[in-house]
Image (tube, grey):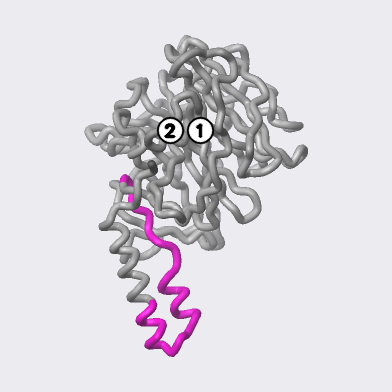
Amino acid sequence: MIISCAKPIDQIVVWARLSALVVYILFGGNVSVYAQLNKSKPVYPGQIWPDNNRNHIQAHGGGIIKVGKIYYWYGEERAKDLDTNYRYVSCYSSKDLVNWKFRGDVVNMTDPEKLGARWVLERPKVYYNKNTKKYVMYFHLDNRNYKTAKVGVAVSDKPNGNFKFLKSFRPLGQESRDIGQFIDDDGSAYLIFEDRPAKGFRIAKLNDADYLSIEKEMCLIKAPLEGGAIVHYNGLYYAIGSALTGWRPNPNKYATAKTLEGPWSEFVDIAPPQTNTYGSQSTMMIKVSGTKSTTVIFMADQWRPQTQWDSRYLWMPLQIGNGKLWLPEPKPWQLNVKTGEWSYLNKKSK
């Protein structure tokens, strides 16, 4: 069973749309007026996030790519009462990063390499390769004790699958647990992965030809962090990571560098440390470049290990620039992907 949308949020959305419809009628059926009033719904950080079927989005530890005008969000499907012999990766699509359509489970996989009971498939990340016109998925593949420490690779001809498992390996010959993805402004694709023995996380460039292998190592950031996320903004690279506390949230930190090779600055807090990043863990940063502004969204998970199907998402626009990065206190907000502007509810654009 997939959990349904919480009633308070539903009521807000329904009343807002009914109000817009009333105004629409009063304005004599003016479609442009109604469309303006009934545009994208807000993002409610930490709340139930319903998809087009009114089910809570199941895309945990996920990643997002944009192909054409469509965003695709891939993540761990952790709905209640799933068959424990399988691991599932879900796919959602959107044009505005707010309203999401469920495209199905694009991975429905049994143990691919005899890893044993409670084997692990986590943090799926998908890249679109323009040369092969294929969608390439990387994910953390492991056994129950996290000793295998590999990445798995699967490929599909379509964004909504099905993805076929190809292989697993240790990137650069190193242990790999939490993984992240980064696509630079020039289209180059990178894998980020935590290397526990090296007490840091590595940035590795994928082979441009097909993304099926590592071309070279860019950097080992010597900091014992996981949940690695990177964004390139106004000439600087910003990297965010989470301390090694498992399911428990902690104060996420960031560093900057002029190139991916480094050197990287010292890591400092992205939010008041006593909030433990508002109960969340980093998974990605999404840069939305519009006609008027550029917004960088902090994309994080609020894990609920005992009720994983009810884990939430904390998405908030970051205050970023001139080597500084800060996560504001989470509040409901709206985004215009065309202009790149965002605003809190009932407040001016940022």
Residue at horizontal 34 percent and vertical 74 percent from the top: 18
Q: Quadrant of residue 39?
A: bottom left
Asked if residue 280 is positioned above or below residue 193 in the image, the reply reads below
User: Along the line of sight, which residue is nearer the eye, 95 or 337?
Assistant: 95
Asked if residue 177 is positioned above or below residue 126 in the image, the reply reads above
The circle on residue 82 is 2
Report x, y in % for residue 61.
Answer: 45, 34
Callout 2 touching callout 1 (CB < 8 Å): yes
Residue at horizontal 67 percent and vertical 42 percent from the top: 186
Quadrant containing the C terminus in the rendered view: bottom left
Asked if residue 331 is positioned above or below residue 207 in the image, the reply reads below
Quadrant containing the N terminus in the rendered view: top left
Estimate how packed mark 1 is, as few (under 14), some (14 to 19) or many (20 or more) residues with alpha carbons within 10 Å.
Answer: many
Q: Quadrant of residue 138?
A: top right
For the residue labelled by badge 1, is the local secondary structure a helix, a strand or a loop? Answer: strand
Q: CA distance from mark 2 to mark 1?
A: 9 Å
- Res. 193 visible in picture: yes
Magenta-colored stretch includes residue 255: no
For the residue labelled by badge 2, is the local secondary structure a helix, a strand or a loop? Answer: loop
Upstream in the sequence, badge 2 or badge 1?
2
Residue at horizontal 37 percent and vertical 36 percent from the top: 80
